[in-house]
Each structure stands twice: as C-alpha cells, then as structure tokens.
Amino acid sequence: MKSLKIFIVEDEPLIASTIEVALRKKGYQVVGDAEDVMSAQNSILLTEPDLVLIDIQLEGDLTGIDLAIELDKIELPYLFISSQTDSSTINRVKQTNPLGYIVKPFTENGLQTNIELAWHNYQTEHSDILEIKSEGRLHKINQNQILFLKAFDNYCYVHTTTKQYLVPHTLKHTSEKLNQDIFKKCHRSYVVNINHVDALDRNSLIIKTTSIPISASQKSLMLSKLKGR
C-alpha cells in the first residue's frame, strides 16, 4: 500500500510520541499532530493528510467527536483512538462516520492492522471517486457523473451531470486518474465518458446537448468502444 500521510490528534504528549514512532516504524508518514480541536483543524488544512487519528478526550471544551463532525463535512477519513468504551461515548461516536475505533492500549501490530483494514475498506468504497481541487476547494466526484473533460491550456474543465469544474491540472494529468475502461480520448482536447455518449456522427460525439469533436484517428476506436458498452 502507499505510504499514508497521517495526522495525530492526541493531548497526551507521551502517547502522541508513542503513536508517531509506531507509525513511522510501519512505514507511514506522520505529517503533524495537535492537542486540541482548533489547532488540529488549522494544521489539517495545511498538511492535507490522507487519514487522521483522533483521541476523544482532548484539551479544551471541544472533544474529538466535535472534530470528527467537522471532518465529516469535508469527507476526510479518520479513526478514533480511545480508552473510552462506555455506552455514552459510543452513542456519541455514532453521530459520526469513523473508519474504525481503536481501543487503548494497543500494540504496534494492532495499530497497523486496524489502519490497513480501515484504509482498504475506504479505498474499495471510494474507488470510483475522483478528487479534484477547483476554486480553492476539494471536491469528490463520482466518476459515473462525469460527462467529459475539456483541455484549457494547462488547466482542464471537468463537466458533470450537474456542473463544471475548472481544475488546475492538464487534461492528461486529470484523465489518468479516471477509470480507463469508460473514459476515452476522442480528440486532443477531449476525454469522454462513453457511457454518456448519446450519438456519433461523422465528425463529432453528442453528449446531452454538447457536440464534441472526434478526430479521424480516434473514430474507429471510439465506435468499437460504443458498440461494446
């Protein structure tokens, strides 16, 4: 698996250090840590981790559950790490959507196992999701909702069933993240979702109300893909 970027939210310095050492030994990247919710929110935005480990009882008035609610809003995955297993705490945890709940104390192998299983399940569930940044915000888009991509200098537009996004990456870079079985290049400036192609004529494809040019070199390949969909 790739080297995950992990952020730790834990108000006990010794425990935070122990977790960090254990994670690094297992090959993970620890991109930062925080002892309270406000510091964690600010640092998480700056470090952009793949995954956050959250203790429930933290310094200050806000708890790890308050942080989890905020992470749910931006769809950033997290795991709780806590010694609390009482029904009141578990009922509050049910208000959130963690990938898992690791009970303290834990072993290094136990920590790694929980993280790997949680991340595997997360990736499986989100395998058809494209993450893009547009206008300073992170968006997660179901690939099935993408109609086509259009090149725009060193940027590209991602057109979906509901809106379009201007992405600060080239068409090539963005399209490489897509499912290659259904996204095909029909022109040097366009990549289309063949499942959304409504018609094919001499020089263009029709998707909804949009006419998209198709190059002569791609026409036969596109036709065969459309027949086989």
Image (cartoon, helix red, strand yellow):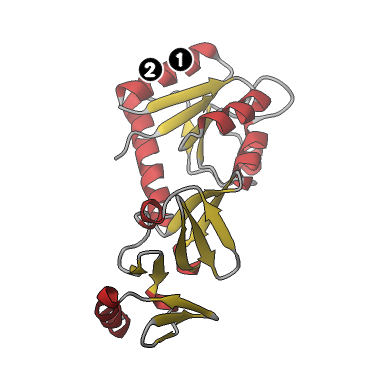
Q: Secondary structure at mark 2?
A: helix
Amino acid beneath label 2: Val
Q: Position of residue 66 (x, y in %)?
A: 67, 35
Query: Given the current orientation, which residue lies at the most extreme right position?
Result: 61
Q: Dividing the image into 4 quarters, which one contains the N terminus?
A: top left
Identified at 42% across, 16% down, the residue is 18
Q: Is disc 1 surrounded by few (<14), some (14 to 19) or many (20+) residues within 10 Å?
A: some
Identified at 60% across, 19% down, the residue is 35
Q: Position of residue 212 (x, y in %)?
A: 45, 75
- Tell me how far mark 1 sits from mark 2, CA to CA: 6 Å
Q: Residue 128, relative to residue 10: is it above or below?
A: below
Q: Nearer the viewer, residue 199 or 1?
A: 199
Q: Nearer the viewer, residue 208 or 29?
A: 208
Q: Dividing the image into 4 quarters, which one contains the C terminus?
A: bottom left
Identified at 38% across, 17% down, the residue is 21
Based on the displayed image, in which of its 4 quarters is residue 128 positioned? bottom left
Based on the displayed image, in which of its 4 quarters is residue 161 positioned? bottom right
Q: Which residue is mark 1?
A: 17
- Whether the residues at callouts 1 and 2 have beta carbons within 8 Å, the answer is yes
User: In the drawing, does residue 227 fall left or right of residue 75?
Assistant: left
Identified at 35% across, 62% down, the residue is 179
Q: Position of residue 130 (x, y in %)?
A: 45, 55
Q: Position of residue 157 (x, y in %)?
A: 51, 59
Q: Secondary structure at mark 1?
A: helix
Q: How many marks?
A: 2
Q: Residue 157, relative to residue 20: is it above or below?
A: below
- Give me the disc on residue 21: 2
